[in-house]
Image: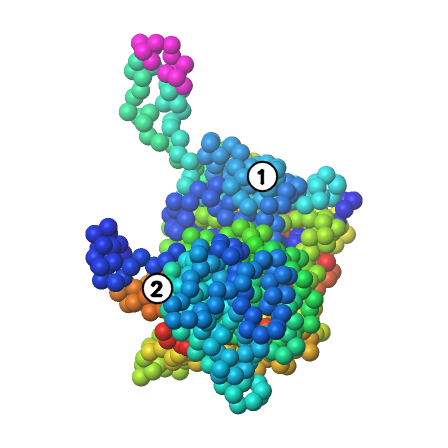
Amino acid sequence: MSIVEKAYYSPAGRKVAAKAGLAEPPRLRRGREFPHGPIVLAPLGSSNLVADALTLLGRAHEAPVVDAGADAPGYGDRIGALVVDATDVGTVAELEGLRAVLRPAVRGIERSGRIVLIARPSTGRGWEADAVARALDGINRTVAKELRGGATATLIYAHEGVEAGDLVSTLGFVLQGRSAFVDGQSWHIRHGGATVERLADRPLEGRVCVVTGAARGIGAAIARTLARDGATVVAVDIPAAGESLAAVANEIGGTALQLDITAHDAGARIAEHVAARGARIHAMVHNAGITRDKMLVNTDAARWASVLDVNLAAEMRINAVLLDPDVAGGMADDGRIVGVASTSGLAGNKGQTNYAASKAGVAGLVAAMAPDLAERGITANAVAPGFIETEMTARIPFVQREIFRRVNSLNQGGQPIDVAETIGYLVDPASQGVTGQVVRVCGQNMVGA
Amino acid sequence: MHHKVVVVGGNRIPFAKAGGPYARASNHDMLTAALDGLVARAGLAGERLGEVAGGAVLKHPNDFNLTREAVLSSALAPETPACDLQQACATGLETTMYIANKIALGQLTNGIAAGVDSASDAPISVSDPLRRILLQASRARSAKERLAAFAKVRPAHLAPAAPRVAEPRTGLSMGDHQALTTTRWHIDRASQDELAAASHHRLGEAWGRGFFDDLVTPYLGVTRDAVLRPDTSVEKLGTLKPAFGGPDGTMTAGNSTPLSDGAAAVLLASEEWAAEHHLTPWARIVDAEVAAVDHPGGADLLLAPVGATGRLLARQGLTVDDIDLFEIHEAFASTVLATLKAWQDEDYCRALGLDGPIGTIDRDRLNVTGSSLAAGHPFAATGARIVPTLAKLLHERGPGTRGLISVCAAGGQGVVAILEAV
C-alpha cells in the first residue's frame, strides 16, 4: 500500500475525502436476498405478464403511487422495487405513464432497491413503437444514473411470445442482490420453451459446470457460486496454478483439471474428464483470460497473438469439440455457454488493443453462436465485467484505481461474486429464453456503454 | 488375489533439492499438499476413504502419527483412518502394496498410498549422554536432584546428532556402498553420465508435453521438479568431480540423486469402487516381491531387487520380454547399470537361487519419462511417484501392457512390483 493510499484510508483522510465529494460508497445488497420493502408493480396497460411472473416468484406486489399533478406524491415507507410492465407501451404519449410511476418511485426507493422495466423490443412494430422501445433505454440509463444508495435500474426487452415462466429467472436475478453490480443495462428475452414455475435455490443440482481460470479471482468466485447453486464443478486452470486450483476444487467438492486451454487437445481433455465421470456438460464458462497491455505503437506480433489465442481462439476451439454431439462428455442439449467479455472490449481502452479485440470478439461470438445453437436448446451469452476488485486490479496504481472505482453509477468497484452471480443466472436452466446476450457487470461504468 | 486392484490416479508435489524452496516445509505440510492435490483431481473432497498409508524415512518424534495427522489436515473426511509405514527408500512402494493387498483381500475398497520426506527438515536429536541426563532431570523430585543431574553435562554432550545416511552395520554411507558396487561391476563414468543425461532429457520432455498435468500439483510456487536440468549433457556432467569412491571414483553429484524434499500419493481402488466413483483405472497391481541381501556379509547394498525381480517374474510365469516398460529407481546411475548387468549375469542370478539370468532389456523401455536422478528422490515418496507414472504410461500404451518397478532401499532391501494396463 502506497503512502497516498494509507493516508486516504486513514480516519482523517476519509473525512477529507468525504468533504471533497468522495463519500463512502453505498454497501450493496448481495446474494439471494429480495428487496426489504414492498415490490410495487405498475402495469401500463392490460398486460398480466409481469404480474404473473411475480406470482411465480412468490412475491406479493402493491399498487403504484401515480404522479398526476404538479406536487408529486410520495410513498409513506420506502419501497423495495418498482417493476413496470411496459409491454403495452407503444406510443410517445404513453411514455408519460412511465414518468408518472417513476417519479415517486425514484424518490421513495430503499438503498439497493430496484427499478425494473419490462418492455417490447424494436422489432419492426412500426416507426413509433420502435422509437419508443429505444426511448425506454434512454429512460433506463438515466434513471440508473440518478438513483442513489446502490439502487439500480434494469430494462428487459421481452419479445412477443414470452410467457411469465420465461421471465422468472431474469426477474428473480434482477430483484435479488445477485444483480448488485448490474446497472443501467438492458437485454433481451425470448420464449424459451422450458416450463418454469418457480425460482430454484439450487437450480444447478446434479449438473456439471466447467469453469476455466478457476484457480483465483473471478474464476474462483464463479466456481464457488455455481457449486453453491448445486453444480458439480470442473475447475480448470493452467498447471502452474494447480495449488490454488486444488484448494478451490476441494473447498467446493468439485474436481481440479490442470490444463492449458491453448493446448491443441484442450477441448478433448475437458470432454474426457467429464465423460469419465459419466456426464455431459451443462455449462461451459470460458473465464480464463490474459492481458499483455501495451500501447498499439509498442504491440508486437507475440503480444497480439497470445492474447487473441487465450481469450478468443482457444475458446472457439474448445467449443467446437464440446459442441460435437458425438463427443462423449461434450455439451448437453439445453446446455449453456458463457463467455467473459469486458467493458474494455465494448468501449475500447488505451493500451489494450489486443485485449479489446479478444473481448469484443467474445461478445460477437456469442451473438453469432446463439441462433445456430437454438435448435439444441443451447444458449450462448457473455458477461462483460467493468472494474472488479481482484488481485489483478489491486496492482493498478492507487489513484488510477480509485478513479476506475468511482466512474460508475454505484461509486465503487464490483466484487468477483457479482460477475459470478450474473453467470449463475445465465446458466440457470430457467434462463432458456436468454441467448446471444451480453450483460455488463460494471455498475454502469461511464465507458463501454 | 480375490479382487482386482487398480491404480486410478496419483499426485505429487514437484520434488526439490534439500535446502531449496521447501526448506521450511515439514513432512506434514508436504504430505497434506500431495493428498489435497489428489483429492481435488479425483473429486474426493469430504469423502471417507478406506485407509491412507504413508510414511517418511526421516521423521520427527512428534510425527509419530504423521499420515493420520496429514489426513486430518487434508480435504478428506476426518473419519478416514491412516497408518505410518517405513521401509527406507522403498516406503512408497511398500505403502502401495499394503493398500493394494487389503483391497485384494476385500478389507478395503479403496485407499491412498503415500510417502514423503524432507531432507531439509531432518530431525536433529541430542547426544545419547545428554538425553539420559535430561531424562534423569525430568524425573528428579527436587531442585537439588535436578541440579545434580545437570552437573553431569559435559561440553561434548552438547553437539547435536543429525541423522546419518549411513548403514549402521558397515558405517558406510549409501554412496560409499554404491561405489564398491560400481567398481565390482565395472561401471564406467561415461555410461553413468549418459544414463543421468537421458534421465534429465526424458523427464524434461515429459514435462514439456504435459504428461505431468494430471500427476503433479504445484506447491509453494514450484511448478516443476526443481532438480530437473533438461539442458544438461554428457559433456556438462563429465566436468563434475567424483563425490564417492575416492579421487578416481566415477560417481559424481550429477549421476547420484541429491538429497531431496517432496511427497507423492497414489489412489488405489477395487474395479467396482473406481467405476462407482467414475474414475478411470490406469493399471492393475499384478504382484510384488520384497527381498534383502546380506550387505554386512559383503553383498551389494542396493542390488536386493535383483533377487526379487527374478522370483517375481518366475512366480508370474513371465520373462523380461513380457514386460513393456521398466522403472528402475535411480538411486545412483550406477545402481541402475549394475542392476541391468546383474540381470544378465548367469552366475550371479544362480547364486540368488534363480534358474538363470533374468535377461537383457532395451534401454528405450527403461525409465522412459526419467527417474530419480532428474526428478529427485525424497526417500519415502519415490515409490509413490513411480507407481502412478508407470500406470499412466501403461494406460497410454493400451490394455495388457505390463510394467515392472524395482526400488532399492537402505538395509540391503528392495521391493519389486508388476503393473498391467487395464
Q: Which residues are magenta?
A: B135-146
Amino acid on which the number 2 mark rests in the picture: Asn
Badge 2 is on which residue? A411
Q: Is residue A403 left or right of residue B291?
A: left
> Where, by quadrant of the figure, is residue A274 drawn?
bottom right
Give the letter of the chain under mark 2: A
Q: Are marks 1 and 2 on the same chain?
A: no
What predominant SS class does the magenta segment belong to?
helix
Residue appearing at x 69%, y 69% in the figure: A194
Is residue B273 placed above or below B190 in the rendered structure?
above
Q: Between B333 and B134, which is closer to the camera in this rendering?
A: B134
Residue occupying image coordinates x 42% and y 45% = B25
Residue at the location (75% across, 40% down)? B105
Give the x, y percent position of residue B252. 42, 54
**In the rendered view, how is the structure colored?**
rainbow
Image quadrant where one finds the C terminus of chain B: bottom right
10 Å crowding of disc 1: few (<14), some (14-19), many (20+): some
Residue A429: x percent and y percent? Answer: 64, 65
Tell me if residue B145 is in the magenta stretch. yes
Q: Amino acid at mark 1?
A: Pro
Residue displayed at 48% across by 36% down: B59
Residue A64 seen in the current view: yes
User: Viewed as shown, does residue A360 lie left or right of B283?
Assistant: left
- Residue positioned most to the right: B2
Q: CA distance from mark 1 to mark 2?
A: 45 Å
Pick the front one: B38 or A32: A32
Report the front residue among A43 and A145: A43
Residue pointed to by mark 1: B78
Residue A311 higher or lower than A8, as above or below: below
